[in-house]
Image: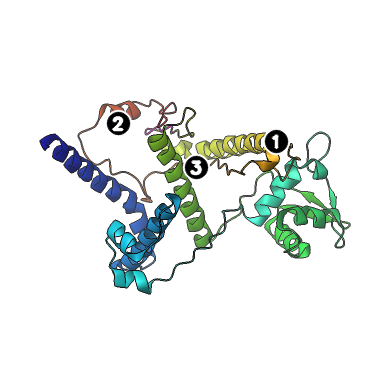
Amino acid sequence: MIFSQYMVQNTDRFIFRWLRMVLRGVVRVALRNSLHLQEFVEILKIVYLQEAESALRSSGKAISASKIAAMTGVHRRDISRFTRDNSQPSPKLPVISQIIVQWRHNPRFATKAGKPRVLGAEGDKSEFAELVNTINGGNLNHYTLLFEMERLGAIERKNKRVRLLWREYAPEVTQEEGLEMLAEDVDDLFSAVGENLELRPSIPNLHLKTEFTRIPAKRIDSVRTWLLKEGSDFHGRVRSYLSQFDRDFVPVTTEEETLEDLRIAFVTYSLASGGGFHGPAYDKSTKNDSAHDKNIKNGRSRNERTEH
């Protein structure tokens, strides 16, 4: 019994430390946007309720206010006053990103060599209109997307025809768009690591990190440029590989027609910074370095780590 209490107490202490680490980045964003604690707590209650409801639904149990209150500690009067949207659409790539992926990998819009073709763009029956319709089923005006892609510099229009210019769609994003991408990526990371730790699949989700801490400042720009190029090239290879199996690109076999569609996400990021911007990072101010931290400080790569 003493051992069990010890384990529980230590688990609780770890979770508290872990939550502080995870929440630092979230709180920094909240402070920069003048979000006060009271507002943050209200949002936290809503998320607690949504996740509890999702957990009950996944386990096949009936959803009730009393069960949710017991799981979350949220008072029943708060549960009754919150309205929740239960019809959340499945995540989709931004429309322009989807169009570029189709243009580069769908045989209907690429050359025999696998390069994006120059497409006719005049009229509702044009090749570009057909490309857009493969993404949204006619819900968006292809002229609107044509204008936006031209504005962003993603295409070149000449003599009623358009040519894809960008290998990657990476325009300047607004703060709102950037934070939305961050939220989606963090949610995916939690799911990937959670599956590795809780389900222990025979083939785990990819979760790697390489870190060096003594790169001279004058090398940062060249390092960033190299990482952007290599990362973009590798994402291109990933898209080419996955497009061989996606129903939007290739016809499905009779056997596959009855199978469930699954989502695959491959996310990368790099950080090359002198520490001027404090993002959601672990506080390494302690002098009590672990052996792992010492290895990192000696320049060793952590690129073989998984949570398997």
Q: Residue at x 49, y 66 (%)?
A: 85
**Quarter of the view holding residue 7:** top left
Name the amino acid, label 1.
Glu
Q: Residue furthest left?
A: 2
Q: Nearer the viewer, residue 236 or 279?
A: 236
Element under disc 1: loop
Q: Is residue 65 left or right of residue 117?
A: left
Q: Residue at x 42, y 45 (%)?
A: 190
Q: In the picture, which quadrant includes the N terminus? A: top left
Q: Position of residue 216 (x, y in %)?
A: 41, 35
- Where does label 3 land, which residue? 269
Would you identify the image quadrant in which residue 95 lies? bottom right
Q: Which residue is mark 1?
A: 255
Mark 1 or 2, closer to the camera: 1
> Which badge, 3 or 1, is on the more N-terminal residue?
1
Crowd class of label 2 (few under 14; some 14 to 19; many from 20; radius 10 Å): few
